[in-house]
């Protein structure tokens, strides 16, 4: 919230759309399940509205598009036990496997005094360790190069506090990404990794050069 209004979450801007939607849904589902036996569970509808505003603003900020286009791109009708709900959905196709689907919405606020307490996070398709999942993506988290165009490596720092040494001066892009994500690792192509190791500035157009065969 900023000045009483829902806003985007900066720490998620470098995540995939799938991860952003899945994160909001998991957090909201956890809260609903925790309060499932409360007679006034329906009041969480206000929380859902706030979280949905934040979710759509996060996606809009990431892609630099209006919130209305986020709804247009990801709107979906979700069927839960025969009842239809309006929501958002991101689908990731996988060759030879069922697609991964992240959904926002479709969680009924139905009071249930007999509901079991679910205090354990369900194991979803992304149960692999975060770093392993990011490595499997085979994409440089700084320039966007894929394994088809570059070798993928991992840059690691000892502690997040090491990023503070850049305080008071313009932070390199890799520092900004790690600080926003609060991570000590960054998956990079070989070129970006060497640029960081040797203190060279980020070359924004190297991806397009590699794709066109230019040097």
Image (tube, rainbow, N blue to C red):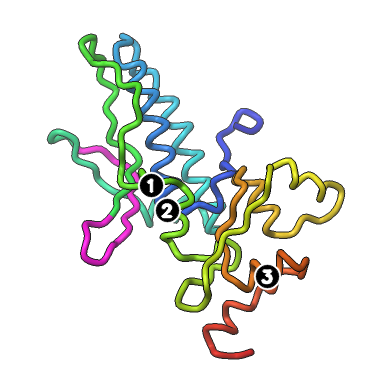
Task: Give the residue at mark 3.
Answer: 194
Cβ atoms under marks 1 and 3 closer than 8 Å: no
Q: Position of residue 20 (x, y in %)?
A: 45, 46
Q: Are marks 2 and 1 in contact (CB under 8 Å)?
A: yes
Quarter of the image where the C terminus is located = bottom right
Q: Earlier in the sequence, mark 2 or mark 1?
A: 1
Q: Main secondary structure of the magenta part?
A: strand
**Magenta span:** 84-99
Identify the image quadrant of the N terminus: top right
Does dot 3 land on a helix, a strand or a loop? helix
The residue beneath circle 1 is: 128
* 93 sits left or right of 79 in the view: right
Picture residue at 67% right of the left edge, 58% below the top: 174
Name the residue rendered at 33%, 58% in the picture.
92
Q: Earlier in the sequence, mark 2 or mark 3?
A: 2
Q: Is residue 87 left or right of residue 48?
A: left
In the picture, residue 118 is in which quadrant?
top left
Which one is earlier in the sequence, the residue at label 1 or at label 3? 1
Could you say whether the residue bearing mark 2 is in a helix, strand or loop?
Answer: helix
Measure the alpha-carbon separation of dots 2 and 3.
Answer: 23 Å
Query: On the image, which quarter does residue 114 sit in?
Result: top left
> Badge 2 is on which residue?
133
């Amino acid at each position: 919230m900023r000045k009483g209004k829902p806003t985007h979450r900066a720490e998620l801007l470098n995540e995939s759309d799938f991860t952003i939607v899945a994160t909001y849904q998991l957090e909201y589902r956890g809260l609903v399940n925790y309060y499932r036996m409360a007679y006034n569970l329906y009041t969480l509808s206000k929380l859902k509205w706030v979280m949905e505003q934040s979710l759509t603003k996060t996606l809009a900020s990431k892609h630099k598009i209006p919130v209305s286009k986020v709804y247009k791109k990801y709107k979906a009708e979700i069927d839960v036990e025969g009842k239809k709900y309006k929501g958002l959905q991101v689908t990731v196709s996988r060759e030879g496997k069922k697609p991964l689907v992240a959904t926002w919405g479709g969680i009924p606020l139905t009071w249930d005094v007999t509901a079991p307490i679910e205090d354990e996070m369900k194991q979803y398709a992304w149960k692999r360790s975060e770093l392993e999942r990011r490595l499997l993506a085979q994409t440089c988290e700084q320039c966007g190069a894929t394994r088809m165009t570059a070798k993928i490596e991992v840059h690691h720092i000892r502690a997040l506090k090491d990023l503070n040494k850049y305080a008071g001066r313009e932070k390199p892009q890799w520092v900004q990404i790690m600080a926003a994500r609060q991570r000590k690792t960054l998956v990079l192509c070989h070129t970006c990794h060497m640029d960081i190791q040797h203190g060279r500035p980020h070359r924004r157009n190297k991806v397009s050069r590699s794709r066109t065969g230019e040097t």
